[in-house]
Image (cartoon, rainbow, N blue to C red):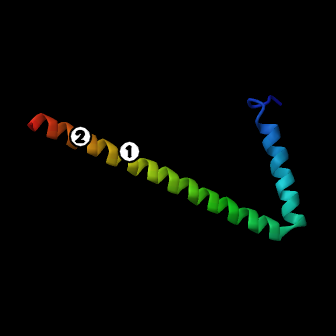
Amino acid sequence: MGDFGGGAPINSYRMNRIFRQIKNDPVRFVAWKKQLRIREAVGWAVLMTMLVGVVVFSAVLLAAKKHNHSD
């Protein structure tokens, strides 16, 4: 058994703990899943906003460059 960068054993332990919690407290697990989904949605929203911002910013820069050249 080699360790995969030291991450795998911790992850499997964490997964086992999560599964045990699911058995003991399904309601909390559902809430956790919902929270995770919300966090994921927020992450995507931030990512999309950043992407749109970069595109708009570059478009504005290009427009400014073109404008300066035409002067």
Q: Amino acid at mark 1?
A: Val
Q: Is residue 65 left or right of residue 36?
A: left
Taking the view exactly as shown, the residue that stands out farthest to the left is 71
Q: Going 21% across and 40% down the picture, which residue do you hit?
A: 64
- The reply to whether dot 1 and dot 2 touch (C-beta < 8 Å) is no
In what quadrant of the picture does the N terminus appear?
top right
Residue 62, numbered circle: 2
Q: Is residue 64 left or right of residue 1?
A: left
CA gap between label 1 and label 2 equals 12 Å
Residue 24, quarter of picture: bottom right
Q: Relative to 8, is 17 above or below?
A: below
Residue 15 image point, x, y percent: 80, 50
Circle 1 sits on which residue? 54
First of labels 1, 2 by sequence position: 1
Q: Secondary structure at mark 1?
A: helix
Taking 8 as reference, is 43 left or right?
left
Q: Position of residue 54 (x, y in %)?
A: 38, 44
Residue lying furthest front in this view?
A: 71
Closer-to-camera residue (61/11): 61
Return the x and y of residue 6 as percentages of the image width and height: 78, 31
